[in-house]
Amino acid sequence: MQPIIKTNIVQDPPADPSGLKQHEPGAKLDQGKIRAGLVLKGFSHALKSVSAVGTFGANKYSDNGWMDVENGINRYTDAMLRHMLEEFSGHDHDEETELLHAAHTAWNALAILELKLRKLS
């Protein structure tokens, strides 16, 4: 099952942002749809760092094994908070991975979000 994710930002029917009618050449009915490029391009450095955290975890444990961790939401919340505390205590990098605690925090936040969205589906 796919998670339930609200992606329609605008409630109006799909429209071409240039005002073209649906069947006119060059029309693309994407007004109001999510613009994933804003995240993927705009946060490319951060996402690469978060991906490094995910890769480290997959190598240490298993590919996508985090999805099946018992009581995952609570455990990843605790892990996220531990990384935040380390960063707030003046330690930028995780000793084991040598990656930024901020990247670990972001990875854990994404894991929590994913697990919550999967519960909704």
Image (cartoon, rainbow, N blue to C red):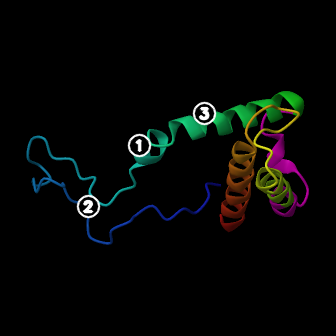
Q: Which mark is residue 48?
A: 3
Residue at the top extreme, as displayed: 59
Residue 111 placed where, x, y %? 73, 52
Q: Position of residue 97 (x, y in %)?
A: 82, 32
Quick one: quadrant of the N terminus?
A: bottom right
Given residues 60 and 116, the one toward you in this image is 60
Q: Quadrant of residue 55?
A: top right
Q: Main secondary structure of the magenta part?
A: helix
Camera-nearest label, 3 or 1? 3
- For label 2, the residue is 14
Q: What x and y, as percent, mark residue 73? A: 81, 61
Q: Quadrant of the C terminus?
A: bottom right
Q: Secondary structure at mark 2?
A: loop
What is the x, y in percent for residue 47? 59, 39
In contact (CB < 8 Å): disc 1 and disc 2: no
Verify CB contact (< 8 Å) between mark 2 and mark 3: no
- Is residue 63 rendered magenta in the image? yes
Residue 37 numbered mark, or none: 1
Separation of disc 1 and disc 2 at Cα?
19 Å
Q: Amino acid at mark 2?
A: Pro
Start and end of the magenta stretch?
62-77
> Among all residues in the image, which is located at the extreme bottom?
11
Q: Nearer the viewer, mark 1 or mark 2?
A: 1
Residue 117 lies in magenta, yes or no? no
The local crowd at label 3, few if under 14, some if 14 to 19, many if 20 or more residues have their Cα within 10 Å, is few
If you read the primary sequence from the N terminus, does the residue marked by circle 3 or circle 1 appear first?
1
Mark 3: secondary structure: helix
Amino acid under disc 1: Gly
